[in-house]
Image (cartoon, rainbow, N blue to C red):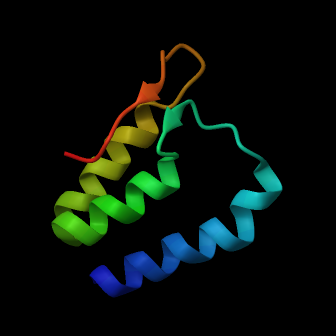
């Protein structure tokens, strides 16, 4: 499951993300965060951390530096 999720995230980063531009309010970007979270914590916990992060990435969020725990 982890390998499939990582492959999907990499496809997103190289195929879709360049068309959207750099709009993330956080450092590292949400896709970089998701890749690192899944690599470190596995598909379940890493996926949960990535989902929480994407939900916090909105216009009313302060953004800033937010590393993977």
Q: Is residue 52 above or below residue 39?
A: above
Q: In the picture provided, is 59 more to the left or to the right than 32? A: right
The residue that appears at 68% across and 72% down in the rendered structure is 14
Question: As rendered, which of 25 and 2 lies closer to the eye?
Answer: 25
The percent coordinates of residue 41 (x first, y second) are: 17, 64
The percent coordinates of residue 60 (x first, y second) are: 54, 13
* Numbered-mark total: 0
Q: In the picture provided, is 16 more to the left or to the right than 67? A: right
The residue that appears at 60% across and 37% down in the rendered structure is 24
Q: Where on the picture, by quarter, is residue 67?
A: top left
Q: In the picture provided, is 17 more to the left or to the right than 62? A: right
The percent coordinates of residue 38 (x first, y second) are: 29, 66
Question: As rendered, which of 5 and 63 lies closer to the eye?
Answer: 63
Question: As rendered, which of 39 and 60 lies closer to the eye?
Answer: 39
Q: Is residue 43 above or below residue 48?
A: below
Q: Is residue 25 above or below residue 68?
A: above
Quadrant housing the C terminus: top left
The residue that appears at 48% across and 38% down in the rendered structure is 27
The percent coordinates of residue 66 (x first, y second) are: 35, 34
Quadrant housing the N terminus: bottom left
């Amino acid at each position: 499951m982890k390998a499939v999720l990582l492959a999907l995230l990499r496809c997103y980063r190289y195929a879709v993300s360049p068309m959207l531009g750099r709009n993330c309010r956080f450092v590292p970007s949400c896709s970089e965060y998701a890749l690192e979270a899944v690599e470190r914590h596995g598909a379940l916990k890493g996926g949960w951390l990535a989902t929480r992060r994407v939900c916090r990435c909105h216009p009313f969020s302060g953004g800033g530096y937010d590393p993977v725990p």
